[in-house]
Image (cartoon, rainbow, N blue to C red):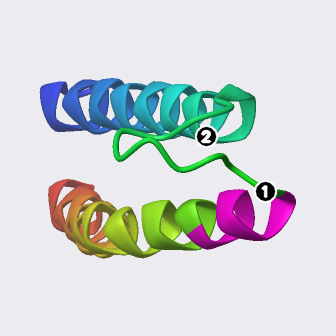
């Protein structure tokens, strides 16, 4: 594997771990930072906000994946 593929996989693993930790924090907390008791509806809203925040890194990773595929075609 080339270094750019290794870095791509490492970055993906980091983003997956961050998303999993953020999701577990959102779903397991009873009270948020403002002191509001979390209902299932508020937890779902917080989860949607978290997903929106992870859309930007996802787009970057997809662009990076396409770049890696095109770079591999030129090498072969």
- Secondary structure under badge 1? loop
Residue in the picture at 44% in, 41% down: 35
* Res. 11 mark: none
Distance Cα–Cα, label 2 vs label 1 = 15 Å
Q: Which residue is mark 1?
A: 39
- Number of residues whose C-alpha sits closer than 10 Å to that of mark 2, classed few (under 14), some (14–19) or many (20 or more): some
Q: Which residue is mark 2?
A: 23
Give residue 8's position: percent from left, percent from top.
28, 39
Decide: marks 2, 1 in contact (CB < 8 A)?
Answer: no
Say if the magenta span includes residue 7: no
Instruction: Please state if 76 lies on the left or on the right of 71 as rendered.
Output: right
Instruction: Please state if 38 lies on the left or on the right of 15 as rendered.
Output: right
Write down the region rendered in magenta: 40-45
Residue in the picture at 25% in, 58% down: 68
Q: Nearer the viewer, residue 38 or 76?
A: 38
| Residue 73 in view | yes
Q: Which quadrant would residue 48 be assigned to in this image?
A: bottom right
| Residue 1 in view | no
Residue in the picture at 57% in, 29% down: 25
């Amino acid at each position: 594997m080339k270094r750019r593929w290794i870095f791509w996989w490492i970055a993906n693993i980091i983003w997956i771990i961050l998303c999993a930790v953020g999701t577990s924090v959102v779903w397991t907390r009873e009270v948020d930072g403002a002191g509001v008791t979390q209902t299932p509806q508020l937890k779902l809203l917080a989860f949607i906000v978290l997903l929106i925040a992870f859309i930007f890194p996802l787009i970057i990773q997809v662009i990076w994946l396409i770049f890696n595929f095109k770079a591999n075609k030129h090498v072969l």
